[in-house]
Structure formats: C-alpha cells, structure tokens
Amino acid sequence: MEKMDKEAETKNEEELPWYRTLTPYKLYVLLILLVTYLLNQLDRYMLAISSKAMAQEIHFGDKACMKNSSVSDSALGGIKCEKLTSEYSCRNATNNQTHDSGICYYDYNGQGLEYQIVAGPAFTVIYTFGGIFISYIAEKYNRKAMLAICLMFWSVMTLLTGFVKEYWQLVILRFGLGFGESGCGPFAVSILTDYFTPETRGFALGIYNWGIYFGYSMSYAFGNFVSLANINGQGWRWTFILSGIPGILVGVLMLFTLKEPERKQDPLNLSGSAFERLGKTLRNFCSPSLLLICLAGSIRNASGYVFAYNTQLYFTQIGQTPEQIGKYLSWIPLVGGSFSVLLGGFISDRLVRRLGLYSRILVIGVSLLIAAPFAAGTLYFDPPGAYFFQIPTYIFGEMWVGITLAVVVELVPSEIKTTAVAAYLFIISNIGGNANLLVPPLAQHFESQHYSKSDSLRYTLFCMYAGPFVFCIPVYFLSMFVLKRDYKRAQETPYLEMEEECPEKNSATT
C-alpha cells in the first residue's frame, strides 16, 4: 500500500506544471546545499588569495622582485620592479635596500612548483579518489548525514590552516580538505536528483552551482579585506579561521533539519557490491558520449582551475593592489557566474522538452564560443577593462557546469547516479585540477625568451585559460552524434537486467 501511495504521488508530481513541483521544503533543501557548496568553494580557494602572504611567512615557492605596497606610483620614478629579473638588480634599483622602506623588494611571490602542488595534486588527488570511495557509501547509507560529516571535517581542516608553521603542515591539511570536500558533489547532486523532477533538475543544479561563484567571490573578500584588517597582527591566518567556522554550524543544522529523500530507482537494483556498481559505472563510462563529455569537461575544467589559482597572482604582478582586486572580484564571479548557471539550466530545461538531450550540448557549445573572446580580453587589456571582460566571460562561460551534470545523470541508469557523478568529477578534476602543474614550466619557457615574470604569466594564461574555451567545443559537439543511442541504452539497462534476473516472471507476464 505504501509503495502504491508513493507511486501515485510520483505520478501526480510528474503531471503538475514544473513550477508547481517546487515546494517550500524542496527550496529549503536547495538553499542548504547551496550554502554547503558555497563553503566548499570558499575554503578551497582561500589558498589562491593568501598564497603570497603565506609563502613569505612560511617560506615556499619562487622568489621575485616586487613593488613595495607602501610606495606610491609617483615615487617609482619609472622603475618597473616586476621587470627586474635578478635579486641583485632588484635590491639595487634604489638606494633603499630593505623590505620595509625600499621601492622594490625581493621575496617569495606565492608562485612556483611548491605552490602549484598544494593548489593542484595535494588537493585534487585525494579529492577525486575520495569522491569515488565516498560515492559507494552514498549508494547504501544516509547521504544527508554523510554530507554533514564531510562538511564539518573539511571546515576543521580549513580552520587549522590558519595555524600552520611549516610547508609540510599545509600539504597535510590540503589532503584533509580534499578528502572532506570529495563528498560534497556526489552526495549533494544525488540528493537533488531525488528531490527534483527531470523538468526542474537543470534549474536545481543551476542554483546549486551558484555556490561556486558565491564561494569563489567571497574568497576574494575574505582573502583580501580580512588580511588587510590584520586581526591580532596575524593577517592571512584569520581568513582561514573565519571561513572555517560557519561550516561546522551548517553541518549541525543539516543533521537536524534535512530529510533523506526516497531513492528514485528500481528496488531490484539496490543490491550489489561496490565492485559490481563500479563495474556497471565503468561500463557506462565506456560509452562514446560519456567519454567525449568527460574529455570536454576536463579541458574546460583545466581552464577554470588554472585561472582560479592564478588570478590573484596575475593581477598582483601587473600592479594591482589587494584592495583593487577585492573591489572587483568579490562580486564579478558572483553576479556573472550565478546568472550564467541559472540561465543555462533554465534554457536547457525548456529546450530539452522540445529538442531532446541534444539541446543541452548545443547550449554548452554556443555559450563557450561566445565566452572565449572575452576570456582572452581579460588578459589582453589592462585594468579596469580586464575586470569588466570577466563579466561576459562568466555569464556565457559557466553555463556548462550545471548542464553537463544534468547530461551525465541522464546518461546512466538511476541506481548508479551518485557513483556516476563521482566518476565524472574524478575524471575532470584529475585532469583539470592538475593542469596547474603546467603553469611553472610554461612560464619558465616564456621567461627563457626574455619576457618578464608578469608577461610570462600572462602568455601562460592565454594558453591555459583562454585557449581551452575553444578547444573543448568540438569535443562537446562530437558527443551529439552518439548521444541519442547511449541515452536510450541507459534508460533500458535496468529493465534488461530485470529480464535476465527474472526470466520466469517475465515469460509468465508475456
């Protein structure tokens, strides 16, 4: 009887207009998961904003000649500190030799291989492998409780980062942060998939992915303005302490107020070991459409990771102060990115009802093509024009995030959606998240051609940030040729398995 009531409720929900299915409680769940993802991104990218001050205090990475922030532009006398390539030329640029009073000073600049390691592999490797492991738990156990535990764990890792004294401590805490954050995507997307209907799933995932831009924008506010406030004389350390505390509180709230949703899958497919689910997931990911989507997502994700972890460093090297960077980037990713994923989800949800799954890929390709020249303009023009070019870059260039997740969950059988999301994130994060390791050798190559450090980083970002916007488009479009066949196969898979497992029952029915 209870099963029949649930089936009737599901049927009635499917017959309602899409906006009538958005109940207040579902929107509350969406809000809590949005805040969770916000904290996920805030804690992750705090390193990118604080790397220079952190490197100068605990000593890691490269050194370079830099302008003293206390010196006015008029006092420079035409000297370009960032153009001075050696410690000797930097220290002899003026008669003032000290860090405190000199026009130029030579110190750790927050870049280099050691920085890219903690930004990339130290976080990404455990983040991606942890996501696969955690997704198995999500198929069997309470996803809401596990997500709350992950949130509180990574928040503690963030808080402790404010107390590091050595580079190795930072590496260990980044490992811990990666493991905790690895549960966010699989758990949250799985919960949203079961709470929202196919007609509103793109909308829900779009709102959820606002967290990327809320958190990323807040990292500039925290990383720059809290550091400048220099609370208790500890500068950057309080940015990690203050960003870590809210996650502990939200985790407790989640435990007591969120309900575990009913899993929308065939009960005959709930059984099976982790290895069986892994095998099923791998078989699905061997389909041409998912392989192409993962490749395209990896290329685009590499662009995002590289720019996110080098934006502050790039604008600092071209002469921008923390106040100027925080003034613009504390709101541009938030406004542009949030509007982008919402618009992309809304457009793809409306088109998918008329044109089918092809329309989601079409929206991704067209939006990236529009965004590409604006991404290049960010690097070509000087501030403030460079900042304003980021607005259309975000509006058009971030639609792919939520739409691609919607495509992935539609291309796999319902009982492995959580594992499929984790596998997708595993692939694009391992490739994209470790692309930062290419930044130091590329920058060194340009430096060997007698470019300054700032110009070398600029040209590196042309290759690693603006370029992938274009490179991934043909890969996305290629997936359209095999999308329909793979989608049909995914929808039929559970029933084919049922026929194999219950031949007597099916023959009797026939």
Image (cartoon, helix red, strand yellow):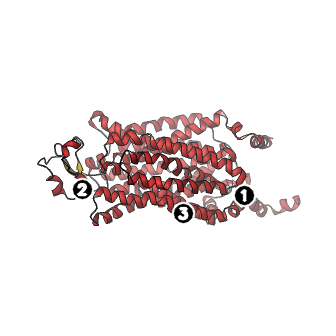
Query: Disc 3 to disc 2, how far (Cα)?
Result: 38 Å
Please tell me which residue is depicted at 64% across the width and 50% down the height of the picture.
Answer: 348
Name the residue beneath numbered marker 2. 83
For mark 1, does the 10 Å Cα neighbourhood hold few (<14), some (14 to 19), or many (20 or more) residues? some
> Position of 485 compared to 32: left or right?
right
Residue kind at label 1, given as amino acid type: Gln
Name the residue beneath numbered marker 1. 491
Q: Nearer the viewer, residue 90 or 138?
A: 90
Q: Is residue 121 above or below residue 349?
A: below
Residue 263, image x and y in percent? Answer: 68, 47
Residue kind at label 2, given as amino acid type: Lys
Name the residue beneath numbered marker 3. 295
Quadrant hosting residue 322: top left
Residue kind at label 3, given as amino acid type: Leu
The residue sitting at the left extreme is 95
Q: Is disc 2 placed on a helix, strand or loop?
A: helix
For mark 2, does the 10 Å Cα neighbourhood hold few (<14), some (14 to 19), or many (20 or more) residues? some
> Position of 211 compared to 193: left or right?
left
Please tell me which residue is depicted at 84% across the width and 62% down the height of the picture.
Answer: 504
Q: Is disc 3 placed on a helix, strand or loop?
A: helix
Query: Disc 1 to disc 2, how far (Cα)?
Result: 59 Å
Q: Nearer the viewer, residue 185 or 147?
A: 185
Residue 161, image x and y in percent? Answer: 36, 44
Q: Is residue 23 above or below residue 336?
A: above
**Number of numbered discs:** 3
Residue 273, image x and y in percent? Answer: 63, 58
Q: Which comes before the other along the chain, label 3 or label 2?
A: 2
Residue 64, image x and y in percent? Answer: 24, 55
Quadrant hosting residue 123: bottom left
Q: Is residue 298 above or below residue 240?
A: below
